[in-house]
Amino acid sequence: MSSNASSLVSVVIPAFNAASTLAETLDALLLQSWPATEIIVVDDGSTDDTAEVLARYGDRVRAIHQPNHGLAGARKTGIEAARGEFIALMDADDLCHPHRLAVQVQYLHEHQDVVLCSSDFSAFNASGPVSPSHAAAYYSTIGQSPRGVRSLYPCHESMQPDWGEAPPAGTTWPTTLATCRGDVFEALAHGNFVHPPTVMFRRSLLRLAGNFDEQARTMCDWDWLSRASRVGQFGYIEWPLLNYRLSPQQMSSARHRARSMADILHVAERICHRNPAFYMREHHRFSRELADYCLWSADARAQTERTEALKLLARCVIRHGHMSEAVLRILFKVLTPTWLVQAMRLGRKRRGIA
């Protein structure tokens, strides 16, 4: 084990109604090879048995119980309680590679100019493994880039991980891991590609970037990462240090979709306002993106929040100069009674079946 093994890592996990998955997540964390670890779980107003699951772990896990504040509020509470030199983010249903923390601490010690590092991740569901490398499938910014993640980070290197032990029978761990690092703000400003549950950052980063903002709601990760990327370089380890759980619960309801679309627009506008010189330099690209976000948000609200949807369409056309067939289609949906829209959909469905 590295001579830096005294560096404390705080793992912060927001948990809302996570009783069915939390124990598996915590059990994997408790098997981490990194010796100096504190696990902080913020029970964010759960109404299931999350508190009972946490109680079984005693002092091995620091449990914080609070009324529901959402993802940003739970992350913020956990980060404020963290005592570690490094802080790692996790979700309450994902599984860590046993050396995740050790590899990331090693990387941050070897790259003092890097303020935050993340990694690739695999994916699984109730039936078993889904993908051994899921980042490109999950983030279109990575998947659509000519060289994948390497198009987004300017410096490409490698590291020799100190595994400290042999892998389990039937598995192999590489002796060299490909890595990337650099200034990623300009790429990140156009859309997130850093997977939050794989993130580890220096505690000192908080002094300059601040903590998570509850006003950013479902897009709090993108909001915070965009601020953090202004402070220093990000690093990326091109090997899955996390197994990401895919579940039916992640499918968005219409209400959740409307909220998410509004949050994307809100955070995108924040990024532009915080960085006016960069916004002006890439004005045309940002205008196209903001117009798209207005359209997505208007479409999601067309049948439930008609007045707000009309305002978003007006913003798309007037502020961002975008007029298209999509604007007219959504306007028609907004102005048409819900029962008629449903009848038209049913008619199309029946004709398709016939």
Image (cartoon, rainbow, N blue to C red):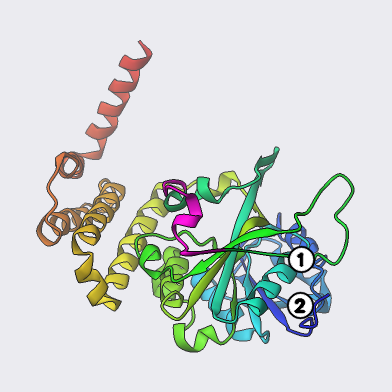
Residue 333 lies in quadrant: top left
Give the answer, above or below, for where 130 lies relative to 189.
above
- Residue type at mark 1: give it: Leu
Side of 279 relative to 256 (left or right): left
x 65%, y 80%: residue = 86
Comparing 229 with 345, the one in front is: 229
Is residue 154 positioned above or below 305 on the image?
Answer: below
- The spot of residue 239 in percent (x, y) is 65, 55
Per the image, label 1 sits on a secondary structure element best described as helix
Q: Which mark is residue 29?
A: 1
* The N terminus lies in quadrant: bottom right
Q: Earlier in the sequence, mark 1 or mark 2?
A: 1
The number of numbered badges drawn on the structure is: 2
| Viewer can see residue 258 | yes
Rendering coords of residue 24 (x, y %): 76, 57
C-beta proximity under 8 Å, tags 1 and 2? yes
Q: Is residue 71 above or below residue 145?
A: below
What span is in magenta? 143-156
Does residue 224 appear to the left or right of 35 in the view shown? left
Residue 69 shows up from this direction:
no
How packed mark 1 is, by other alpha carbons closer than 10 Å (few <14, some 14-19, many 20 or more), is: many
- In front of the other: 202 or 56: 202
Q: Is residue 147 magenta?
A: yes
In the picture of the structure, the residue carrying the numbered disc 2 is: 37
Q: Does the magenta portion include 330?
A: no
Residue 127 x, y percent position in the rendering? 70, 37
Residue visible at 73% across and 65% down?
160
